[in-house]
Image (tube, rainbow, N blue to C red):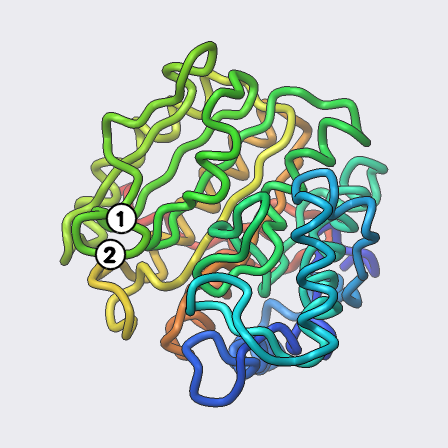
Amino acid sequence: MSPNPSVAVYAGEALARYGFGAGHPFGPDRFAAFFTALSSSPLLPAVRVLPPVAASTEALLRFHTGPYVERVRRQSLLGSGYLDYGDTPAFPGVFEAACYVVGSVLDAIARIRAGELRRAFVPIAGLHHARRDSAAGFCVFNDCGIAIETLRAVHGLRRVAYVDIDAHHGDGVFYAFERDPDLCIADLHEDGRYLYPGTGSAGESGRGPALGTKLNVPLAPGTDDARFFELWPEVERFVARSRPEFILFQCGADSLAGDPLTHLRLSPRAHAHAARRLCALADDCCGGALVALGGGGYNRDNLAAGWLAVVGALTEGDPGSQVPPRPDPTER
């Protein structure tokens, strides 16, 4: 096996610190649940484990407003209060913790663009609710939005695809780029009539010059793998038509059956299938360039299983991996 697999997983205490305390759905123990499972799985030798990297203020300002970044910095020093209307509390060091989330995603992108990596997974990332000027839904800085802006400003790309299978609609990404014709968004999520943030109806497909470049697929409570596999081919065709130069995949595990905050009933097979098919699309369109972002997931066993399924799919076909390919459940 190659000593340098081309798939990376970012791991370390700096990422684990992004969490809102013991007992909170988004607690710091989420990272440990995943990494403990990865460490005891046959996938560990198939990936490069890389340390977290902190983002610069300059990077944050590619997406967020200056006053908001400074507000997070001040409340991080105070360690109290909320960064939104009551979902996202400040804690001592929240600014630095959020910077490590963003910076790890940007480091993965830079290494892929430099040819050092082919794909990467950042478990504590995919904070898709944060607005340009506010936190929201446990999300302080929107690493997804910052990644999109960085791919444009630093790496000179235009056509980016953002695919999101978290149970919650990625509203912070969607509305920030609703008029951007070069950002393809495909977002499968629990119907907003039943779940926060209450957005992402099928009729929301972009505005102005971006009309038709966004795809929202609301899922009824109880949606299972069978329905997901029925819907996926159209999602894949939609993304493929955009011919992306880079793919960001938010693979929140809160869409798995048994999550305490949501009502979908997917299994890790759905996450593996989505990751596998997006990897194939990335291989066809953009030299394999794909970063997967952990997103939500509040049942610890679920997030470990769902994210391991994604990592497994990312390593398939990697010459540095000796992990055998897994059967695709849609192929009989």
- SS assignment at label 1: loop
Query: In the current view of this chain or complex, which residue is farthest to the top?
Result: 209
Q: Which percent across, then down, holds residue 167?
A: 32, 55
Residue that mark 2 sits on: 195
The correct choice, above or below, for 104 with respect to 163 in the image is below
Instruction: Inspect the image, locate mark 1, and give the three-letter code of the amino acid beneath it.
Output: Gly
| Residue drawn at the location 78% of the way across and 23% of the way down | 156
Q: Picture quarter containing residue 52?
A: bottom right
**In-front residue for pair 71/202:** 71
What percent of the width, then of the height, locates residue 298?
Answer: 39, 73
Can residue 192 be seen here? The reply is yes
Q: Residue at 52% of width from left, 70% of height from top? A: 82
The local crowd at label 2, few if under 14, some if 14 to 19, many if 20 or more residues have their Cα within 10 Å, is some
Front position in the image: 64 or 251: 64
Q: Nearer the viewer, residue 265 or 92?
A: 92
Label 1 crowding class (10 Å Cα cut-off): few <14, some 14-19, many 20+? some
Q: Amino acid at mark 2?
A: Leu
Residue drawn where x is 24% and y is 26% of the image = 203
Q: Left of 46 or right of it: where is 142? A: left
**What label does residue 146 carry, if any?**
none
The C terminus lies in quadrant: top left
Q: Which mark is residue 198?
A: 1
